[in-house]
Amino acid sequence: MGTWNEYIIDEGRPPEWPYPVKFGEERQVDVDVLVIGGGIAGCWAAISAARQGVKVALLEKGNTERSGSGGPGCDHWCNAPCNPLSRVDPDEWAEHMVDKPYCNGIGVEIQCRENYDTLLEMEQMGGKIRDTGDDFVGAEGRDEATKLMISPRYGRWSNSVLDPDFGTPGYNPPEKRNNVVIRVWGSTFKPALKKECQRLGVQIFDRVMGTSVLNEGGKQGARVVGATGINARTGEFLIFRAKAVIITTASAGSLWLMSMEHGAYSNMHARTTSGDGMAMAWRAGAELTCMEKAGSITTGTGIKHRWYTGAGDASYENVPIVDANGTKLPYGTQGWADAGTQVVPPALNEEIRKGIMSGKYELPFYGDFPAMKEIEARATWKLMLTEESTTKTMVNVMEEGGFDTSRDQIMSYKFLEGQVPPQWRNANNGGGILTDWDLKTTVDGLYAAGTTLYCPEDHSFCAATGRYAGRKAAAYVKAAPDVEICRAQVDKEKARVLAPTTRTSGIEWKELHSALTRVMQYFDSEFKTERLLKLGLEELDRVEAMASEHLYALDPHKLMRSLEDLSMIDHARMVLIAARERKASSARLGHNRIDYPAMDPPEWDKYITLKQVDGKVVLGELPPRFWGSMKEQYEAHNKDYSGVWKPEN
Amino acid sequence: MSERKIYAVPNVQTPNTPVRFDPEVCVGCNRCVEICPLDVFIPNPKKGAPPIVLHPEECWLCGVCVTECKNKGAISFIYPMPLKPRWRNKETGEVTQLK
Ligand SMILES: Cc1cc2nc3c(=O)[nH]c(=O)nc-3n(C[C@H](O)[C@H](O)[C@H](O)COP(=O)(O)OP(=O)(O)OC[C@H]3O[C@@H](n4cnc5c(N)ncnc54)[C@H](O)[C@@H]3O)c2cc1C
Ligand code: SF4
Ligand code: SF4
């Protein structure tokens, strides 16, 4: 029971829209700081701004309690070199993390310096970060004194850099481990963050989608005076007057993926991850960088059964992978034995493939839970996978279905299913908004944090940068003069937002989404040339023109989805512009130009930036490590940083 | 057999049924409607009746509607058919697929 069709069969008619419809109506809200996107970075930004005594509002498309990639959970708090068990220096670890092309040095330094304080504040709010119930006594990495549990994720190196000694037995002995990743009970985090927002008086607007950032005098690039939003249940139009706006809407998850049938929005992210914030920043005149960065989807495509890793399936954290006959494969398991390699190196992949073809390894492969020590299997199943996120439900339903880690091996699909075609790409964790050391964008009063930033890292990066941006934005508004909204800009935006509701037929959002992803699959794929990229940009103009004439939305929910696709058109445009501008190939950016095949030539070791001035695209560039000395800059900008929040304040 | 009226409706969305409600257990509190990040459900116009799955194909299979429901058994999570996990009993070799 519960489907729409069953309702019609029972009642003889479809249900009416359950919420009051308010298309055309509007409401104005005045605050100091407005946060758009109530995910990990957004909640932290709202909390830290509110703690500075300013008036804060938070917009969230879904329900802040569980929305966003980190909503259901998080099992590992990465790159926390300030934790008491760490064997590395935070500044050195930050340097190590950015010792590769195209990184976010500012965000990484903030992460390494402040994310352990952030975690302790998470604990103050009621998040669980220690094995206080002694459920995992005896698990490797567990520290009895602090009850913190170190994760096997990284060995000597951060996980995106493969250790050159990978595979050498005993190369990562316990006494030499960096201990920079902590296992956490992240399913407790998001509800605690929402509760703290409420306690601090943050005005939360759930089911409200931010649609635009407002500039002074309506002039692109001028300082921020607020933002607009639309309620995804009622269609009410909201106008926010604010001296500072923080964008924390994450990136775009499905620019290349049109399929829903393959299991939800077939990559790791929910449909709500639709690049709105980047589009808003772009339209407001802010500068973005690394937009050409994208890779083939290797994880969580959904066609690989929605296990977190997708590609790795059951292998995740410590679980040995065996073939159909029980032969162990030389496969990274992100565990103690292999020092946490997340991505199986290509040579190893090829070796396994050859083994399959020659009959050395027989398919299917399995994640061999019963071969593990009981406590390690339990830690993977009951802590890592239960807390990780969407896997909690998988753990629950598999247990209900009879799965038992002491007896059963999970089938792995990585090789069985083949790889995702190179046309199916992912822009997530690629390009994004450019900021200074205050996490302020190039538009005054506009801030950004989390995966909305260019080259972001993981959950703890988002939490730490959100917390930092909130603090800086609060300091900014205390000194900023009053702001006034430009009505002409509001009217123009309101007309754009509501246009699809004026039609009842034409192009629905799903068709638009398919058209957009088709453009990306055809014109920004593994075959990149000047001609194809130029054609792609022309195609996007045509798609947008068709949408502006024919896009229709029958209710406020479908209006939100329609607006998301319009955001994604802008996001795609930025990707194509940047891809065209980079006339060289780059391994790290996943950028292969057939017409410029030289891989990472030194003269192209630079960041391409883009923004709009009076509606015209302005390109620029920044040198490697443009953020300067990470340690010095951080210290110069944070003389007043007071560490972990004292609840008695 | 009771007679069922056949209506003219469009093809159903796929996958169609990320969750099932048990009307005997569900109290229609709409907690799942409120918590879902994608707004997959709408409240049932009939007070106390289970919610209606309106946008099933937008579900990202996060499972929070099920984990947050206070009434065990009121709502159960159903992986779409092509995504159902399989496992093998190490000793007997028997392969099971989630139902
Ligand atoms: C399945 C899964 C498991 C993961 N596990 C881990 C882990 O264990 N450890 C780890 O370090 N990382 C993990 N990650 C990554 C981590 O969750 C993300 O990096 C992190 O949540 C990103 O934070 P964010 O604030 O940038 O975005 P999100 O947390 O995704 O938040 C963005 C929010 O913005 C909202 N939004 C978007 N557009 C608008 C708009 N226009 N108006 C209003 N609101 C809007 C969205 O609804 C969303 O709530 C995982 C990710 C996934 C998908
Ligand atoms: S399934 Fe649970 S949460 Fe949803 S309406 Fe029924 S009782 Fe409430
Ligand atoms: S699994 Fe998640 S997205 Fe799907 S209906 Fe439940 S709460 Fe909504």
Image (cartoon, grey):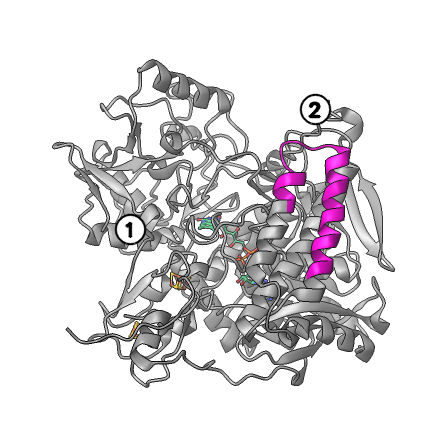
Please give the name of the residue rendered at 16% of the width and 32% of the height, measured from the top-left corner: B93
Q: Quadrant of the N terminus of chain A?
A: bottom left
Residue at mark 2 to residue at mark 1: CA–CA distance:
43 Å
| A150 is within the stretch colored magenta | no
> Residue A286, percent across and down?
77, 57
Please give the name of the residue rendered at 80% of the width and 40% of the height, measured from the top-left corner: A622
> Residue A330, percent across and down?
36, 22
State the residue in front, A577 or A222: A577
Please give the name of the residue rendered at 45% of the width and 38% of the height, measured from the top-left corner: A179
State the residue in front, A637 or A420: A420
Identify the element where label 2 is drawn.
Answer: loop
Q: Is residue A527 above or below residue A392?
A: above
> Residue A319, percent across and down?
31, 34
Is A87 left or right of A316, judged from the image as shown? right
Is residue A215 among what the camera can see? yes
Dot 1, crowdedness within 10 Å: few (<14), some or many (≥20)?
some
Number of numbered discs overlaid on the protein picture = 2
- Residue picked out by circle 2: A599
Residue type highlighted by circle 2: Met
| A535 is within the stretch colored magenta | yes
Residue type highlighted by circle 1: Val
Q: Quadrant of the C terminus of chain A?
A: bottom right
Q: Are marks 2 and 1 in contact (CB under 8 Å)?
A: no
Quarter assignment of residue A46: bottom right
Q: Which region of the structure is painted magenta?
A: A519-546
State the residue in front, A102 or A149: A102
Q: Which chain letter matches label 2?
A: A
Quarter assignment of residue A127: bottom left
- Residue picked out by circle 1: A395
Identify the element where label 1 is drawn.
Answer: helix
The prevailing secondary structure element of the residues shown in magenta is helix
